Image (cartoon, rainbow, N blue to C red):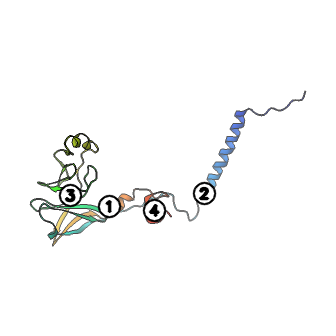
Amino acid sequence: PRRTRRPPPPSTMFRALTFLGLLAVTSAFIGRAAPRANARPAMTMKTVTAKEEWVSVLSSKDIAAGELVPVDVDGISLLIAADLDGKIFCVANICPHLGTPLEAGRVGDGTIVCPLHRSAFSLETGDVVGDWCPFPPILGPVILGKLAPPRNLATFPVRSKGSNIEVFVDRNIKSRFESKYWAGLLDAQGKATGDYY
């Protein structure tokens, strides 16, 4: 009798086809991934150095005792505050609790009080003074206060120079913060600079 050759078992055939498929995909990928002379890296991060300096933000006559005046310095939202004695302070215009503006808050005895949840912060140090998120009653301390742990308010050195109020800030802080994000095909930096298109 004549012997016929049997086909290899399915598992051997499957292994061979899988190997050939992987080989084809790998070679296609390696061929495309070869560096080109003018190619830019897929991900870049730029280094931005600090640029700390005194910046004039407000005229001394534009703020009175007990007032809050919002100012913007290079994309940094700040709040100039005069306590009840007229001493000038500078704090971030953002409540550490939920990120809401503090400009509608009120100045207390050396403190600024958040208009929404009534957390108070020292104008001098930024420390939390009293209870964290005491308002509204029950809901504030039990639920809203648990959304974020107590955090201090950012403060900035401030001085009067001539008839102006100056704040000591890092003028590159926004750029330094954004530089920590990669720049690639689908990032916000590429879209903002036009490199994306």
Q: Which corner quadrant holds the N terminus?
A: top right
Q: Name the residue type under label 4.
A: Lys
Q: Name the residue type under label 2.
A: Ala
Position above or below: 182 against 163: above
Residue at the bottom extreme, as displayed: 162
Position above or below: 98 against 45: above
* Res. 34 mark: 2
Q: Nearer the viewer, mark 3 or mark 2?
A: 3
Q: Residues within 10 Å of mark 3 (few under 14, many from 20)?
A: some
Per the model, the C-alpha gap separating discs 1 and 4 is: 20 Å
Q: Position of residue 121 (x, y in %)?
A: 18, 51
Q: Position of residue 141 (x, y in %)?
A: 22, 41
- Quickly name the residue at label 3: 104
Q: Along the polypeptide, which appears first: circle 3 or circle 4?
A: 3
Residue at coordinates 60% horizontally, 57% vertically from top-left? 34
Q: Position of residue 103 (x, y in %)?
A: 22, 59
Residue at coordinates 24% horizontally, 45% vertically from top-left? 150
* Res. 191 mark: 4
Q: Do residues under tags 1 and 2 come within 8 Å of each other at their CB atoms?
A: no
- Quickly name the residue at label 1: 173
